Amino acid sequence: MLLVMKELKAVIHFVCSVEFWRMALLWPVSLLTSHFQLLFQNLFPRKSNPYKRCVPPITGIKRPVCIVTGATSGLGAAAAYALSREGFHVVLVGRSSHLLSETMADITSRNKDACLEAFQVDLSSFQSVLKFKDSLQQWLLDSDMHLSIQLLINNAGILATSSRLTPEGYDQAADPGVVKTNIMREVPSFLSLMAFTVLKLLGLLQSPEKGINSVLDAALAPPETSGVYFFGGKGRTVNSSALSFNSKLAGELWTTSCNLFINSQLACRDLSN
Ligand SMILES: NC(=O)c1ccc[n+]([C@@H]2O[C@H](COP(=O)([O-])OP(=O)(O)OC[C@H]3O[C@@H](n4cnc5c(N)ncnc54)[C@H](OP(=O)(O)O)[C@@H]3O)[C@@H](O)[C@H]2O)c1
């Protein structure tokens, strides 16, 4: 009884929050818009072909290196496995060493040729990210690998039910979606179960293995591809919002991100001196 009351209280609290309504209204609208575009493309096929995937060649024993963040669950784990199958040396980034070992064992059991390396990183802490950068550079130097990273799947993230800051005071963001993963771990279980059930009934809920296809399409698109929005797998794309083409805003985002990075780097150096 106490548990039910607690769950009910959490549901009411979440349903009354701005985050809930932002997700409940904006997310289905953008999702349905993309699905309608796919439907339209099926009914009236375009002349342009879907994008073909393009995997960097393996030169000698050196495999192309890719990094997958949030590789211990859902889409990240599916991406790590799929990219190991494509011949990449996959660097798995996760915050739990136990989950990293479990994911590596799972991938190796399904792909005996997989080349994997794991790093324990908490991406919400800049200090942890900087430590990762140093360890990664050292590992690349020590292990006769390609000295560059060919691919970064910047995947880590959760659907947070409240806004919170990193230890350095920065905001964190999440990108909600429609793949059955642990994404709703913070949402009261009653609501997440209901959301997944409705999505399944509507035929919109995908497995991580299927859902990862548009991410892989984007990651492995021909190098000259830029500014397209992959959706629905099989190399298909849909139109993204006008805001995503705002180059002034994109420039500001880039400059702000670079400044945050430089300031945090300086702050971390000061702390360690
Ligand atoms: N599921 C969807 O329908 C969907 C659709 C579109 C986009 N997305 C986006 O896809 C990404 C992956 O989500 P998912 O659905 O696969 O969810 P998930 O199953 O919950 O996986 C999230 C992964 O990110 C890791 N992670 C979270 N915070 C981290 C941090 N601070 N440092 C390091 N790792 C961290 C988690 O590690 P722990 O397990 O250790 O917490 C976990 O491995 C998210 O960015 C999400 O917004 C999801």
Image: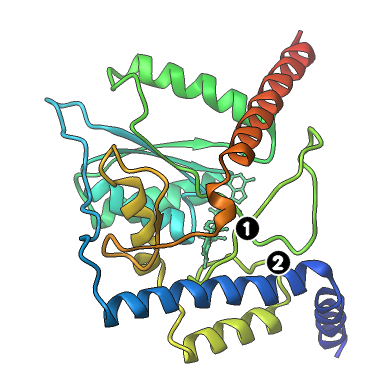
Whether disc 1's CB lies below 8 Å from ligand 1 is answered: yes
Residue 73: % across, % down: 49, 58
Q: Residues within 10 Å of mark 2 (few under 14, many from 20)?
A: some
Q: Amino acid at mark 2?
A: Glu
Give the quadrant of ligand 1: bottom right
Q: Amino acid at mark 1?
A: Ile
Residue under the point 31% across and 74% down = 41
Left or right: residue 162 compared with residue 95:
right
Residue 33: % across, % down: 50, 74
Residue 152 placement: quadrant? top left
The answer to the question of whether label 1 and label 2 lie on touching residues, with beta carbons closer than 8 A, is: yes
Q: Dividing the image into 4 quarters, which one contains the N terminus?
A: bottom right
Query: Residue 186 — which label?
Result: 2
Residue under the point 33% across and 61% down = 213
Indicate the colouring scheme.
rainbow
- For the question of whether residue 239 can be seen, the reply is yes
Residue 273: % across, % down: 76, 7
Residue under the point 44% across and 16% down = 138
The total of numbered circles placed on residues is: 2
Residue found farthest to the left: 60
- For the question of whether residue 105 can be seen, the reply is no
Residue 72: % across, % down: 48, 52
Q: Residues within 10 Å of mark 1 (few under 14, many from 20)?
A: some
Residue 60 placement: quadrant? top left
Q: Give the secondary structure at mark 1.
A: loop
Query: Residue 158 — which label?
Result: 1
Looking at marks 1 and 2 on the same chain, the residue that comes earlier in the sequence is marked by: 1
Residue under the point 87% across and 86% down = 5
The foreground one among 72 and 53 is: 53
Left or right: residue 21 compared with residue 124:
right
